[in-house]
Amino acid sequence: MKIIHGIGASKGIAIGKLTLCLNIDDHIQKKTITDVEAELSRLDEAKAASVEALNAIYMKALKRVGEANSMIFQIHIMMLQDEDFYGSIRNVIKEEKVNAEYAAWKTGRQYSEMFAHMDDEYMRGRASDVIDISKRLIRNLDTRLANGLDSLSSPSIVAAVDLMPSETVQMDKEMVLAFITKEGSKSSHSAILARTMGIPAVVGLADQFAQFSDGDDIIVDGISGDVILSPDEKTLSDYRVKQGEFNRHQQELKLLKGTKAITKNGVQIEINANIGHPEDVDLVLENDADGIGLFRSEFLYMESKQFPSEEEQYIAYKTVLEKMNGKRVIIRTLDLGADKQVPYLDLPHEDNPAMGLRAIRICLDRQDLFITQLRALLRASTFGKLAIMFPMIISVDEVRQIKSLIEKVKSDLTKEKIAFAPDFELGIMIETPASVMISDELAKEVDFFSIGTNDLTQYTLAVDRMNHCISKLFDSRHPAVLRMIEMTAKSAKKAGIWVGICGESAADTSLTEFYVKIGINELSVTPSSVLELRKAVQQIDLK
Ligand code: PEP
Ligand code: MG
């Protein structure tokens, strides 16, 4: 038995078998071979296994999501059987005398580059498909790389170097008992995803990660951050007891459903939930949140092979608004870039993407995309209480540009006789030190502020939120961050607008009293933290 310490990123206890999901790009090896024929027949076997698996996935998807949405798997089969593509992999093996894994990887990347630069939109959309296909071949060639997040076959604890949002969107969430990752911090996206799903997670295991192998028996304690490898009988039974206690505590919290987050001295705080996907609304309702404080709309873009159309977005937003039945839904416009990449966006390489072309900067640069999203949002606005929020703001000028684009969309829709709500709120995220420093000016322009403490901490402290080497320095309780929050709250109060927090530290109950004292009106947290936070507010007495 071995106890390994990491960062507890999502509460709960899981006991089970480990599935090691390694990222192919990080682990592909180039090897010289001598027996070309043997290598070619390994490749043929992997191709046959891939086609068989794709056929099975196609049949399953056909039942679940219908013909149109399942076609992609037939396209993958066709591409795999395409003489050009498959022939190129064979040629790399023959000419370079290299292993089939490397040949498939190299060819996949070459074809993807080629597709990405084609004029035809449909062909550009295939750039990520060839990568998917080459990865499938590699998984069938190398048992070490056999597990993919999209091919989990039984419920297990997933171990990965990190979970990028683009990979997790394809994951079968019912198959995941817990996550453990080598990289990541409390506010990295894998941690946020685990909390949204309400499953335990330990992240930032660093070099200790090398000790795990596929099929290991492990315990994940997302509360303490411990991972126990090959637990003995006594530890196992102690943890079963702990797991029972945790589950009982969760049951007790359920008794708070239907109550409000009001302090003993009568201050009411709106407690909302953060979501990334329309399906997450079920978790919001299950946990009785007052509304949705952050819908990270970029996940719609990441699940798609090309930009989601106005109609697709409209349906997603309308579904969420309808399900929330009149409760406030704050939808954040797309926040792509940095760690949230989509291949079809074709962003230039950046040395420092967290400070690069991302979020509102992309929207103001590529206004056609932004207008499509705004049109979808406004059209959906008649189905509930919509508020729209913009990420990564650093200037008043950006807000004015956004407002003038919204006016343009309103006037276009009016001309086209398409209805939209007359009274939706507009807000901005306060997640850069610049926006804090000019929050008095910004407050005159909008209806509300929502403080994104994940990025605000990253930019205030100059600590990369994704970098596990410095995760100890990532501290949303640092006095500099707390002063930033207080300054923002003061500006909001002075201008008479409301202010909330939607970053991960909104759920930190050791800060709840401070937030209430400085005049924070709303806190938005992952659905599984709503009731715990409601309890914390109810215990506060400011008298
Ligand atoms: C934040 O930065 O705090 C935030 C809520 O946005 P995201 O985590 O999606 O960057
Ligand atoms: Mg952010």
Image: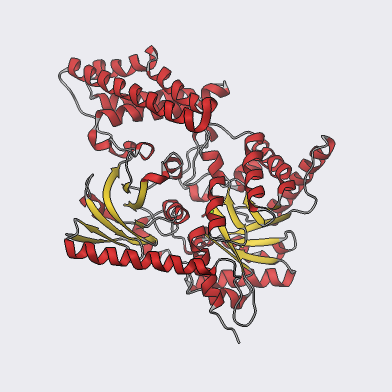
| Quadrant of residue 318 within the rendered picture | top right
Which one is nearer the viewer's eye here, 129 or 435?
129
Say whether residue 348 is left or right of residue 194: right
Say whether residue 466 is left or right of residue 261: left
Q: Residue at x 66, y 65 (%)?
A: 439
Estimate the x, y position of residue 172 in percent, counting from the top left: 41, 41
Which residue appears farthest toward the bottom when viewing the image? 543
Quick one: quadrant of the C terminus?
bottom right
Q: Residue at x 52, y 25 (%)?
A: 67
Q: Residue at x 75, y 50 (%)?
A: 403
Q: From what the image shows, is residue 406 above or below residue 519?
A: above
State how the image is colored. secondary structure
Q: Residue at x 22, y 61 (%)?
A: 236
Estimate the x, y position of residue 498 in percent, counting from the top left: 69, 66
| Quadrant of residue 336 within the rendered picture | top right
Which one is nearer the viewer's eye here, 506 or 288?
288
Estimate the x, y position of residue 296 in percent, counting from the top left: 56, 49
Q: From what the image shows, is residue 131 above or below residue 159?
A: above
| Quadrant of residue 497 within the rendered picture | bottom right
Which one is nearer the viewer's eye here, 276 or 443?
276
- Residue 394 in sight from this viewpoint: yes
> How many badges with numbers are in the image?
0
- Residue 277 in sight from this viewpoint: no
Say whether residue 434 is left or right of residue 226: right
Estimate the x, y position of residue 144 in percent, counting from the top left: 24, 37
Which one is nearer the viewer's eye here, 501 or 293?
293
